[in-house]
Image (tube, helix red, strand yellow):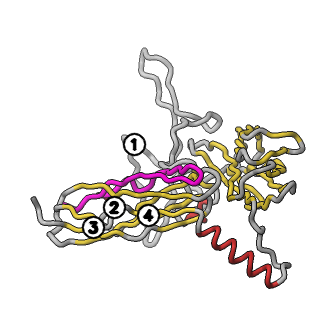
Amino acid sequence: EDAAHEPLELDDGAAVVALGPFATVTIAVQVAARKAAAGGGPATAGPTAAEPRAAEPAEPAQPVYSRYWLHGKGAAPAGNIPVTAHFTPSRVTLGAGAAGRLRLTVAGGPEPASGEATLALPDTVSAEIDGAPADAVTTLRYDLPPGGFTSWDVTVTAKPGAPDGRYFAAGSIVDRAGNTIEDAALLTIGEAGEVTRDLPPEELFFRLQADSQALTAEADVAILDSEIRLPPGGRGRLRVQVTSSLASRLRGELQLISPLGTWESTGPWTRAVTVAPGGEAACDFAVAVPPTAAPGWESWLLVKLMYFGRVRYSQPVRITADQPG
């Protein structure tokens, strides 16, 4: 693939490429501006590398979690996230009057990048950014050279009387593909704290158990239909409910999962979901039975919830082809 070759000749936008046995050929395509028609105005071209792209998001569910691999959703999001944002550490325990420290980092790839990062904090904490007081929502400017990064130190303290619970701080940017890339850090108030290797065995076991229970109780996803029965070619809805016990807003994504052969008749395959603190949110998906299905045909569906690096699955529901009419 590193060998130099002569440019291909195009005939009405098509080129013939010769492939030998077990060969691989890489084609580099360079888009050029159209020539202006005789007597017409100047030619126009699409956005160049130095110009911002349209703000239309490339991913159907927004925001896009920057540590997307934790959601097990599949390949990298559209654009491959050449510029991303992330927190370190990903969790901070806040006690009475005790401050916690986060670092929000924006890092780039081989091209220079510039823009604004947004830091959003729950209203139950006060914060300083690099020693200066911060608002609940703060905009931070970044200008990165190729391969560069920048970071901000964030000190957070629980306000007096802040209710116990699990809160999230969010840091986000908007990339050139139009996606909102977001990372989140867990802020706990009223919990024992993180699990560390230097803890005595009794305390280690207590924290492991308490943390596991708190994590399990954060959110749940359920399908409200015990079964879906439709005639061949019939269409219906799959009703889904997401419940959150978080003390701050849950922002996540619901993905519809079903066997190969049913994908074209169900949708959308993924959608964003937002749940208020301690609240519920309902949504639905379109489902259908293939028109060629015989009565008695069966398949299944389930829904996957992804948020802040966590994953939950609903129970499966059966979908059955009923007798027509």
Q: Which residue is drawn at 83% across and 55% down?
A: 101
**Which label was assigned to residue 319?**
3
Q: Quadrant of residue 298?
A: bottom left
Q: Which of 11 and 274 is in front in this view?
A: 274
Q: Quadrant of residue 307?
A: bottom right
Is disc 4 placed on a helix, strand or loop? strand
User: Is residue 174 shown to the viewer in this render?
Assistant: yes
Please, which residue is most extreme toward the front here?
A: 161
Q: Tell me the quadrant of the picture where the N terminus can be found.
A: bottom right
Is residue 176 positioned above or below 225 on the image?
above
34 sits left or right of 153 in the view: left
Q: Give the amino acid type for the residue marked by disc 1 in the picture.
A: Gly
Tell me the CA gap for discs 4 and 1.
Answer: 50 Å
Is disc 3 placed on a helix, strand or loop? strand
Q: Give the amino acid type for the residue marked by disc 4 in the picture.
A: Ala
What residue is pinned by disc 1? 13
Q: Nearer the viewer, residue 66 or 108?
A: 66
Tell me the CA gap for discs 1 and 3.
Answer: 46 Å
Q: Which of marks 1 and 3 is nearer the N terminus?
A: 1
Magenta residues (range): 266-291
Q: Which of 13 and 65 is in front in this view?
A: 65
What residue is pinned by disc 4? 222
Q: How crowded is mark 3: few (under 14 residues within 10 Å), some or many (20 or more)?
A: many
User: Is residue 6 shown to the viewer in this render?
Assistant: no
Please state the horizontal and vertical placement of residue 29, each as a whole percent of the image: 51, 47
Q: Nearer the viewer's eye, disc 2 or disc 3?
A: 3
Tell me the CA gap for discs 2 and 3.
Answer: 13 Å
Q: Give the amino acid type for the residue marked by disc 2 in the picture.
A: Trp
Is residue 207 positioned above or below 217 on the image?
below
**Which label was assigned to residue 263?**
2
Q: Residue at x 84, y 44 (%)?
A: 128
